[in-house]
């Protein structure tokens, strides 16, 4: 078995699509629009692994993500090397994205850093 895709509700689907395309080389499929349900979505594909589905419905409310909470809290994207983690974090910082976890080696040996996407979702950037 494998995880096929993860999905997140978003407020600005086009800004979120551009963010994942620009910084994580995601490739967006065709935009799905269901006017009857007032719903739009994109599936984003990466070089390998699970896809990410961005979904939008205007009536979905915002969850404050400024504190830890029960439920899904982050997903991780592997960029291949310590140098690539550092370079991507430097670029995201330069572009004014919030870095909530500075690059470090964790107690269990992972090299990672954490950034918030434009809507506050946590992304671990790892080797």
Image (cartoon, grey):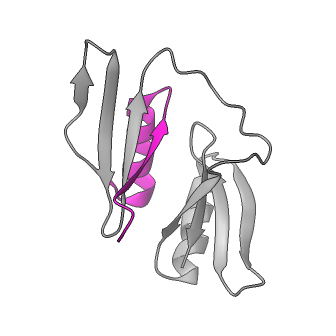
Q: Is residue 122 left or right of residue 49?
A: right
59 shown above or below 99: above
Q: Quadrant of residue 93?
A: bottom right
Q: Is residue 24 magenta?
A: yes
65 shown above or below 56: below
- Most extreme residue toward the front, as rendered? 1
Q: List x then y, in percent, for residue 3.
A: 39, 63
Q: List x then y, in percent, for residue 72.
A: 61, 50
Q: List x then y, in percent, for residue 35.
A: 25, 14
- Most extreme residue toward the bottom, as rendered? 109
82 shown above or below 46: below
Total residue callouts = 0
Most foreground residue, 11 or 92:
11
- Most extreme residue toward the left, as rendered? 30
Q: Is residue 68 left or right of residue 109?
A: right
67 shown above or below 86: above
Residue at 19% across, 38% down: 30
Q: Quadrant of residue 85?
A: bottom right
Of the 4 image quadrants, the one containing the C terminus is: bottom right
Residue at 63% across, 41% down: 120
Q: Which residues are magenta?
A: 1-27
Residue at 61% across, 72% down: 86
Q: Is residue 68 magenta?
A: no
Of the 4 image quadrants, the one containing the N terminus is: bottom left
Q: Quadrant of residue 42?
A: top left
Q: List x then y, in percent, for residue 98.
A: 69, 48
Residue at 36% across, 69% down: 2
Q: Is residue 100 left or right of residue 72?
A: right
Most foreground residue, 93 or 75:
75
């Amino acid at each position: 078995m494998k995880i096929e895709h993860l999905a997140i509700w978003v407020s600005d689907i086009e800004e979120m699509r551009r963010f994942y395309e620009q910084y994580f080389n995601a490739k967006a499929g065709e935009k799905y629009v269901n006017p009857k349900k007032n719903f739009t979505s994109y599936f984003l594909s990466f070089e390998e692994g699970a896809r990410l589905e961005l979904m939008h419905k205007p009536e979905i409310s915002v969850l404050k993500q400024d504190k830890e909470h029960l439920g899904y809290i982050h997903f991780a994207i592997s960029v291949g090397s310590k140098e690539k983690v550092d370079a991507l974090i430097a670029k995201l910082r330069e572009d004014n994205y919030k870095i909530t976890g500075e690059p470090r080696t964790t107690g269990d040996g992972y090299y990672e850093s954490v950034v918030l996407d434009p809507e506050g979702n946590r992304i671990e950037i790892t080797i």
